[in-house]
Image (tube, coloured by chain):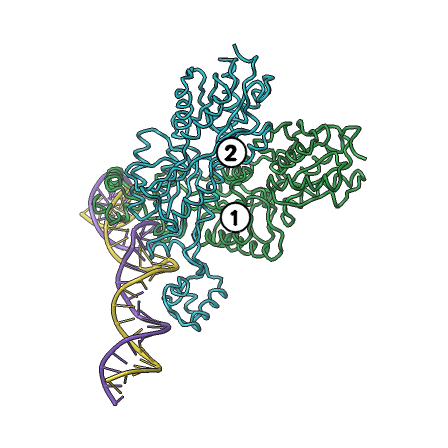
Chain colours: A cyan, B green, C purple, D yellow
Amino acid sequence: MTVTLADVAARAQVSPATVSRVLNGNYPVATATRERVLRAVDDLDYVLNGPASALAAATSDLVGILVNDIADPFFGIMAGAVQSEIVGPGGRAGGERLAVVCNTGGSPERELTYLTLLQRQRAAAVVLTGGAVEDTEHAKAISGKLRRLADAGTRVVLCGRPPVPDADAVALAFDNRGGGKALTDHLLDLGHRRIGYIAGPEERTTTRHRLEGHRAALAARGVPDDAGWTVHGPYDRRSGYEATVELLRREPSLTAVVAANDTVALGACAALREAGLSIPGDVSVAGFDDLPFSVDAVPALTTVRLPLAEAGARAGRIAMGREAAPAGGMAVVQGELMVRGSTGVPSKGSGG
Amino acid sequence: MTVTLADVAARAQVSPATVSRVLNGNYPVATATRERVLRAVDDLDYVLNGPASALAAATSDLVGILVNDIADPFFGIMAGAVQSEIVGPGGRAGGERLAVVCNTGGSPERELTYLTLLQRQRAAAVVLTGGAVEDTEHAKAISGKLRRLADAGTRVVLCGRPPVPDADAVALAFDNRGGGKALTDHLLDLGHRRIGYIAGPEERTTTRHRLEGHRAALAARGVPDDAGWTVHGPYDRRSGYEATVELLRREPSLTAVVAANDTVALGACAALREAGLSIPGDVSVAGFDDLPFSVDAVPALTTVRLPLAEAGARAGRIAMGREAAPAGGMAVVQGELMVRGSTGVPSKGSGG
DNA sequence: TCACGTGTAGAAAGCGCTTGCTACGCGAGC
DNA sequence: GCTCGCGTAGCAAGCGCTTTCTACACGTGA
């Protein structure tokens, strides 16, 4: 039924070994023979059997990219960049790699499941993007899984995710703390003193780091931080909307709202607008990530630009072994404060 | 080095066949034996060798999802929905499927490459999302590839993509034509007569269908359509911006701009704003797709909502064989006109 | 002329798993 | 008591490929 190597060999009047060598190009084959083989491959529409090949060669051409939310451009941009660097080991025919992105939905269980699946497929490399969950149990499970993957020869790269202890994984971490601090410093410089903070999900590293940066900025100036001015929620628009409503209820005199990311900030803007508050006249708003739509918000969003594409591309190259891992197995990728229209000096009249 | 089925068998004092049957759960195994085997699996940290398993069983648990642009939420939402429905054939341990999304970047060559790669992996199913390229050459190549995939037992589902002739693939197509017509009808109803159109890339089916809907609406009312009022460009923000600048240059009296999708519309809004034109006071703007950020644009974007998540989920279920294919192998998925703040009656003073 | 290197191709042994068939033990039916 | 059926488990034959080792032909230098 399906065409096999042997069929091609028969048609080209050579042995299966020769066909395999032509296809893999890692052994000298006379030009005439090669052409005969390639013609046979074409004639028969032969497609290599991946599993069989992977089994015999004990390697596979799969590269996994794990993302928390595939519908979020934050991950899409990184994943796309990683994928763009995942290319075959050379120009040879069939030398392609299958770069696949797996959507964990932010669930540690699914993350683990996918890692097992990739381990089962003997993936050549795995790139994990985005913040991790800080649950000790899961952290341990993930760390163990990553170690075993590395032991089995799978290259493991973390992109936008803090290093994992004992895991022999290269880490490219975003400076979320520094970014968060820069953002709040900017607001403090403008004169804001009552700043609401809409944080991400409690247990995520990204959430914690950004929040730590915010608090560090406040502490450095001796600005008090009311615990009630921080609200946690998922990284989505709705969360931003609801959290803002809640913040305004708790403290109507807030002059600024910092959101966990741009998407959340958009929700915050919507809530403020509905409350009849102008941005930044009444309340300043800031986001994080600088996703493409942020510049088109009205007013344009002040945010921290994260070089998602660059980091993803670099992670991809490291995963492919085309770029050396940074010294110490980890590098910190800096964000850049983008000051735009959504932040301004607090109005005199606002607050009590 | 690595643990194999045989190692597990030895430790559990059973034959490899028994271990395999415990793992696959498709053959009666005495409870005591099963437990002994599972303990051994745990003790040894055994992970099934996917390629070997796929080779022996002549099936794989890979499901491919092809998208044009993974950084675009349009695709991210669909892909996520597809993936959420891709589950294993039952509760049995290890019954997971590996749903993977492949980013073609809109390039037909990469699309073909990924299909070959998936064919090579003997994927269980393949879901292709988004519009296709209308180049005859490529259409033929894709069609042939899909047919061969189907012949090999891979289920093929098209999601948001028109049917492919001779390809034995289930198609869930969006009614882009109807949506485009509804949108332009809405503008015509408001009184607009000079409507600019920012279309997507020339050779894509999505582009053509939406544009056809637009033109059909105009023709139905006898409204002349100046060829210069249509500009083509990629599906991104920048394209919307530049096209709008160009449209305004060509015809400053336009009272409305219809964009190929919401992202493009955002760029259009930016250009209009920079030109000092108010939305919808001076110029109305409409998008397509109703992506999450569209409601947060200022003013909120009038657009056509496409049920991306629903369509993706359905495609996923069909790919898994958990839902019957629609009669005739294809279904048309309707969009819904969402009238919001970005469109209004044309101002009296505008135009010449 | 003979031995030898060089370039090219084949034979065959697996890679780790699945599964059809066989084998075995045991209680039930005749 | 013997056969039969049933519930389990093992045997062993592949699945389609890669790769080591071997074989052969040919040209070359001694």
The image shows a total of numbered marks equal to 2
Residue type, mark 2 in image: Asp
Local crowd at mark 1 within 10 Å, few (<14), some, or many (≥20)? many
Q: Disc 2 marks which residue?
A: A290
Query: Residue A60: which disc?
Result: none
Is A197 above or below relative to A324?
A: above
Is B345 above or below relative to A155?
A: above
Q: Disc 1 marks which residue?
A: B104
Q: Quadrant of residue B305?
A: top right
Chain under numbered label 2:
A
Residue B106 in the figure: left or right of residue A59: right
**How many angstroms separate mark 1 from mark 2 (CA)?**
24 Å
Residue B316 in the figure: left or right of residue B222: left
Q: Position of residue D14 (x, y in %)?
A: 34, 59
Which label lies toward us, 1 or 2? 2
Q: Position of residue B272 (x, y in %)?
A: 68, 34
Q: Position of residue A247 (x, y in %)?
A: 49, 16
For numbered disc 1, what is the local secondary structure?
A: loop
Residue type, mark 1 in image: Thr
Q: Residue at x 56, y 31 (%)?
A: B292
The front one of A157 and B38 is A157
Chain under numbered label 1:
B
For numbered disc 2, what is the local secondary structure?
A: loop
Q: Position of residue B266 (x, y in %)?
A: 62, 35
The front one of A39 and D6 is A39
Specify whether disc 1 shares its chain with disc 2: no
